[in-house]
Image (cartoon, rainbow, N blue to C red):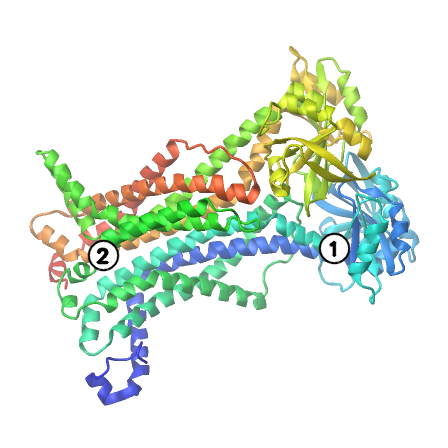
Amino acid sequence: MALLGLRKGSLVERERGTRALMPTIRAMGVLAAAHTAAHPVRTMLTLVGVCLGVGAPVAIDLANRDVLRSFQQSVVQVAGSATLEVTGGEAGFKEDAIRLVRDHPDVLAALPVVQRSVRDEASGEVLTLIGTDLLEAALVKGIRWRETEDEGARPLLRDDALWIGGRLAALWGGQAGGSRRFELGMAVRSLRIGGVVEAGSGVGSVWDTMALTDIATAQEWFECVGSLDRIDIVTRAEADIGEVRLALQGRLPGGLTVRRPAQRGEQVEAMVAAFRLNLLMLSAVGLLVGGFLIYNTLSFSVAQRRRDIGILRAIGLSEQGVYALFLCEGLMYGAIGGALGSLAGVVLAQSLVGVVGRNISELYVAVARLPGHWPTWRQVGPILLEGVGLGVVLSMLGAFTPSRDAARTDVVGALAPGGYELATIPNLGRWLWSGVGLLAAAAGFARLPPQGDLPVFGYLSVLCLLLGLTAVAPAVVGRLDAGRKWWISRRRDRNAAASLAGIAASAAGRTPHRNGVMISSLLVGLAITVGVVVMIRSFRQTVEVWIDQTVVADLIVTPAGWPYTGQESKLGGVLPRSWADRIAALPGVAAVDTYRNLSMELGGRPRTIVARDLGLHAERSRYLFLRGESAEVLRRAVRGRGVVVSEVLAGAMGLSVGDEVVLATPAGSQAFPVMGIFLDYATDGGKVVMDRALFLEYWGDEDANVIPVYVAPGADPHEVGRRIHALLPGAEGGPARFSVLPNADLRREILEIFDRTFRVTYVLEAITVVIAIFGIVNTLLTASLERRRELATLQALGAGRGQIVGLLLWEAGYLGAIGGLLGAAGGICLAAVLVWVINKQSFGWTIALTVPFEVPLGAVLAAVVIAVAAAFWPARWIARQPLVEGLRYE
């Protein structure tokens, strides 16, 4: 009651007592709603700003959860009732291991699995194909067959039959007995549709977009007879799964891993944790800018209702009551804007999920989105609560200071023109030193190590940096009038434009607190934009240098679709070793390398094992080693039967030159000495590179993912490419299922993947800047209203409407320039934190910071243009107000 009630001892309270509380609350609600409805444009701008500020993080969170949920559900549904699985990395393992699994007394079933991705030739759609024991799969995986042409088991065992999911059957008009052509690795086959596979429950599931065939058929199609990708195990209900896992791990050959199926989802989630966190933190900046928008809106409301506040105080409303009145108004903006932001986030997430899913697929692991992921009404409830909660927190942060200032308004001063602003001039020295302290804290946090794998102190450094610049902004604005006086002292001739500029500088300097908030909203948006752009530019330039040093082959022979197929999908297949020998014999070819990479679990995460001719690589190209010259390090690795590891892997596993890294090979665990550590940006999981001969000794794998070709001096690369196409075979008389990429095309495709990765970042930056623009409009409306009587007096003295508009535009230009300068400086500091702290601690990459001159300069110019453009409408509005009403205002 003390917060919302009337002043103790007032006439109203003595007469009505506690019965006055509810009518007072209703009255305050009516006042707030009436004032909001009377200013629809300002209300709309505020609600849209809060909606965008809340919608961005909600959308990013939903998109990330949707993509990972799809992967996790796929793992769970494909596993069925399997409680354990045996994997051997991307290279697979010999199928003899299944006998050792089935011999364990607590194993009820063990299903052999070959899992690959194939592409439908007509539609281009990629689907997952699983080869397994179809008779037992129906029980273990909870699936059923329909539309088979015969009864019994015989149709399931045909060597050309494929069972497709219900959604694919509906799209393709698939009927039992029909056929379609599919790309299977390097071959194209015409496969017969045996029928439809679906979940036993009959409802939609991951099986709708998958295909199945018999295990022996899959081994033949993919030329991996005698090899498996996985074994799905069903244990007895009463058995201890942990004990069974340990027992199986002990009896299986080295290089195989026994784990629970759900661990695959957990591994992927751990891999993309930093990626998700960075997007969420970037989207949350919109919330910070939205807080400034709430502040501006309520400051406008306080300024416009100053006389009302004085009247309410005069008739007995307490300071707490005034405080609560404006807090409730801010709460209304937060709740409504948060709810709208949640709904907008749900819609935006449907667009972002494809982009986020593609980024995760290209950078980490192949992820297919399950159909029907629009949230149900039951799921919308928690999402709305999340958005309203964010909106309420946002509104409380923005509403605190204006509500406090309104509560402290003096009853007499509220009725006098200009009293409010004079009563709320802040202590600029205190703000300045607070800003300096926050900036010092930002520098201190940037030097602290990560917590676990997350750059917690890096994000605190960014927050302190932005808040420090925000605190410094009012002090900078307060120096505008001093700057004006210095300028006048240096010049005696002043034309009309200079006079307007001087008056504008003086006016802006008289209200440093409110104008500082406008600058803060602008500088935060610009700092984020400049910081991220500089970081991306630096990263891209570093990657280009890395490509120039490592990707030097003139031509690259690849499976069709590479490099977009990724490692996990196994879509593109591999190239036979014999192709390299045939290409090497062609005229115009100086040398041929073979590049083989496999995914292997190392240190609890999937890593990449690369095999290539290091001797040839030492002659033709170079790695960017942290220490040592490339050719010498690579030759030493060949002589010493060692490996070189990427900076990311070395940092994750604490490896140094001279240490040993233990790899699980088909022949058992083997330790390899580390001969060098190099920079690499192909994966954030890290990689181990060894000589081709050493790899063959332990893995016995002669295939290649790609074949780099070095053209002899004077030879035409295009002509050599045509000879390669003519030399290598097609598939079943059709076109060749491989590509010959010139070096320039490969570089372009790598950089296209890089650019796509940051598209979501640009969207989030745009949202932040748009919210900042709304804040500028609101602030300038507030400033114009505060000076309505002053501006009317200038008009009465002879100033024209054009001069009034020019005066306000000059003021906006000043504030935009200050915001641009602070934003550019903050952006460069932010880029340093992103490059040297957050990126390094999140992904382990070393990036050379490069600041293009045009980026901060463009930010300053953009700030001025944005501020002037945003001020144009408020300036015209105030200039067109009736002169008499302006003189009579307050």
Task: Name the residue that disc number 1 marks.
Answer: 261
Of badges 2 and 1, the one in the foreground is: 2
Residue 831 location in percent, x, y? 44, 40
* Residue found at the far front of this picture: 658
Secondary structure state at the residue bearing disc 1: loop
Task: Name the residue that disc number 2 marks.
Answer: 426
Residue 446 location in percent, x, y? 45, 45
Label 2–label 1 contact, CB within 8 A: no
Secondary structure state at the residue bearing disc 2: loop
Instruction: Judge left or right: residue 301 versus residue 531.
Output: left
Inspect this view and state whether residue 160 appears.
no
Classify residue 84 by image quadrant: bottom right
Instruction: Judge left or right: residue 200 versus residue 336.
Output: right
Counting residues from the start of the chain, the first of labels 2 and 1 encountered is 1
Pick the front one: 327 or 125: 327
Residue depicted at 32% across the width and 44% down the height: 866
Classify residue 333 by image quadrant: bottom left
Name the amino acid type tagged 2: Pro
Residue depicted at 79% across the width and 20% down the height: 582
Name the amino acid type tagged 1: Pro
User: Vertical placement of 299 versus 314: above or below?
Assistant: above
User: Vertical placement of 81 versus 457: above or below?
Assistant: below
Tell me if mark 2 has few (under 14), some (14-19) or many (20+) residues whose alpha carbon lies within 10 angstroms of its own. Answer: some
Residue 334 location in percent, x, y? 40, 64
